[in-house]
Image (cartoon, helix red, strand yellow):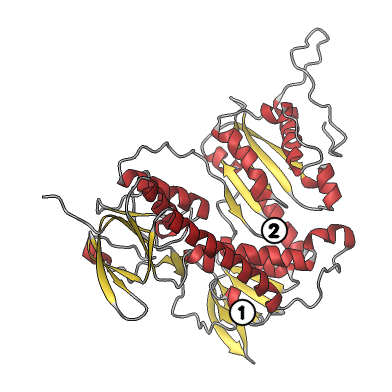
């Protein structure tokens, strides 16, 4: 007897991975239902996470004239007296556009969308509770859980969503603080800390570990932290937050050892937890970990219950919109026995701080840990004509190169446009290319992308032995430089 289901696929959540999974299955001719508890589609990515934070960042950089300060000085402003209302105007327009695009995409692909809270009845049946208090049960052959995450809110932190807030609340603040304490030196904390610093808010970052952004190349982090300290950001590293008190309406972070950090507002960003607590996972044979995350097969994203998959932030690292979309596509392909090519080995990681950070491939620390003989090549953005035109004082690009094969192992960038520039290095790494490509390639002039050539030449000078014998012309000097740079090649 063949079971008859209401839908071939039910996707719980409409964020990046849920959207991609639903559309991919629909393109296979499958009937698809998306259940999302939000009033609008898009999930955390559109409404509280990726899109709001990146829109806030771009708005701040534009209104403050941040990109022009290299020429016109620290006092330069496009708009004085920037208010929260100024920040919200662009955000509302952006979110409206993103929602419209998603809704149109679902209609075009004949994906049904149901607003409501999903709860498992069994592995194939899901109860949908609507906002009006009504409920009905739908059945599906396959299910993909793509519910995303929410900020971790431990009980000892006195959140009031006004002066002690989490990363969901930061885009809904009613006033700009004069000072801000950020608890947590992870990606979210660093992004918001640097965005508010660009608004000339006095920022202090509290992190219990001795370092921030542990997965990023250490030399890059050192350069990044130098830029932040240079503009007045304070770090309290290796220091545990013990409690938060209120004095005259202001939050005061009490650190171990008795240190106190007072500010107008405190942002707590010490992790996130999967939004799985209302799914009734026991009914479908699944169990989340202590942070609400689900365990899956890393190649297929199938859970321990064969017809159920999980994708996106709810399965943990890397928790990127870009990788989440690929996870959704792969899960849909596997669920309906469709061939899918293997994903590239290396994907880029972007941190939308001020300045940006982006990385792909091995860091210097990873190459050393794996025992790979390597060399590095470094370029500073100020060494390019484009960097000089833009008035850039900071920014660097670092290449990690195998001494045995000359293959490019990693690219690490901090500075303007890092999240765009990284894709050049990503392509070369995933195509198993050598760093010599950058030496021989012709780049548009003037561009920041020329930093790849500068860094490659920097590495070439250390990798390639000098041959002084008059009769040996096997090694051609690569020291010729265009007038686009002022870097010295020794």
Look at the numbered discs 1 and 2 and tell me whether their residues touch, using CB distance below 8 Å: no
Sequence-earlier tag: 1 or 2: 1
Mark 1 burial class by Cα count in 10 Å: few <14, some 14-19, many 20+: some
Q: Position of residue 29 (x, y in %)?
A: 34, 47
Which residue sits at x=49%, y=38%? 344
- Is residue 461 at least partly visible in the picture? yes
What secondary structure is found at the residue carrying circle 2?
A: helix
Write down the quadrant of residue 465 in the picture. top right
Is residue 128 found left or right of 369 in the rendered image?
A: left
| Residue nearer the viewer, 150 or 183 | 150
Quarter of the image for the C terminus: give it: top right
Q: Which of 449 and 336 is in front in this view?
A: 336
Q: For this rendering, which residue is in front, 467 or 50?
A: 50
Is residue 298 among what the camera can see? no
Q: Residue at x 68, y 53 (%)?
A: 222
In the image, which disc is placed on residue 173? 1
Most extreme residue toward the left, as rendered? 1
State the image coordinates of residue 377 (x, y, percent, origin top left). Answer: 70, 36
- What mark, if any, has residue 225 been given in the picture? 2
């Amino acid at each position: 007897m063949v079971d008859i289901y209401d839908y071939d696929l039910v996707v719980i959540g409409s964020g990046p991975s849920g959207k991609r999974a639903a559309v991919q299955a629909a393109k296979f001719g499958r009937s698809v239902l998306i259940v999302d508890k939000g009033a609008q589609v898009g999930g955390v990515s559109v409404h509280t996470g990726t899109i709001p934070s990146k829109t806030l960042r771009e708005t701040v950089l534009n209104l403050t004239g941040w990109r022009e300060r290299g020429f016109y000085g620290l006092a330069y402003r496009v708009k004085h007296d920037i208010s929260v209302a100024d920040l919200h105007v662009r955000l509302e327009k952006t979110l409206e556009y993103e929602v419209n695009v998603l809704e149109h995409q679902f209609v075009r692909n004949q994906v049904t969308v149901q607003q409501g809270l999903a709860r498992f009845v069994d592995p194939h049946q899901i109860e949908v509770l609507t906002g009006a208090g009504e409920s009905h049960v739908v059945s599906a052959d396959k299910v993909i859980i793509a519910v995303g995450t929410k900020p971790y809110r431990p009980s000892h932190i006195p959140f009031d969503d006004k002066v002690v807030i989490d990363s969901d609340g930061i885009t809904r603040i009613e006033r700009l603080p004069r000072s801000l304490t950020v608890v947590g030196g992870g990606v979210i904390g660093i992004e918001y800390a640097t965005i508010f610093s660009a608004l000339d808010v006095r920022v202090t970052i509290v992190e219990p570990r001795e370092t921030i952004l542990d997965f990023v190349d250490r030399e890059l982090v050192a350069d990044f932290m130098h830029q932040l300290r240079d503009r007045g950001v304070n770090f309290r590293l290796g220091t545990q937050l013990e409690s938060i008190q209120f004095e005259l309406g202001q939050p005061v972070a009490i650190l171990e050892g008795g240190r106190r950090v007072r500010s107008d507002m405190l942002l707590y960003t010490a992790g996130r937890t999967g939004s799985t607590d209302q799914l009734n996972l026991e009914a479908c044979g699944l169990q989340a970990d202590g942070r609400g995350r689900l365990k899956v097969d890393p190649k297929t994203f199938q859970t321990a219950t064969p017809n159920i998959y999980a994708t996106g932030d709810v399965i943990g690292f890397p928790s990127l919109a870009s990788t989440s979309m690929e996870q959704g596509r792969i899960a849909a392909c596997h669920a309906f026995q469709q061939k899918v090519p293997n994903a590239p080995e290396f994907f880029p990681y972007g941190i939308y701080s001020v300045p940006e950070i982006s990385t792909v491939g091995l860091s210097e620390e990873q190459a050393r840990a794996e025992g790979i003989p390597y060399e590095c090549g470094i370029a500073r953005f100020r060494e390019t004509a484009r960097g000089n035109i833009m008035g850039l004082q900071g920014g660097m690009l670092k290449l990690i190169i195998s001494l045995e094969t000359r293959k490019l192992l990693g690219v690490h960038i901090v500075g303007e446009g890092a999240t765009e520039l990284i894709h050049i290095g990503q392509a070369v790494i995933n195509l198993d290319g050598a760093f010599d490509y950058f030496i021989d390639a012709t780049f548009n002039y003037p561009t920041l992308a020329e930093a790849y050539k500068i860094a490659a030449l920097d590495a070439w000078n250390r990798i390639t032995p000098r041959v002084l014998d008059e009769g040996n012309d096997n090694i051609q000097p690569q020291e010729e430089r265009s007038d686009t740079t002022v870097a010295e090649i020794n």
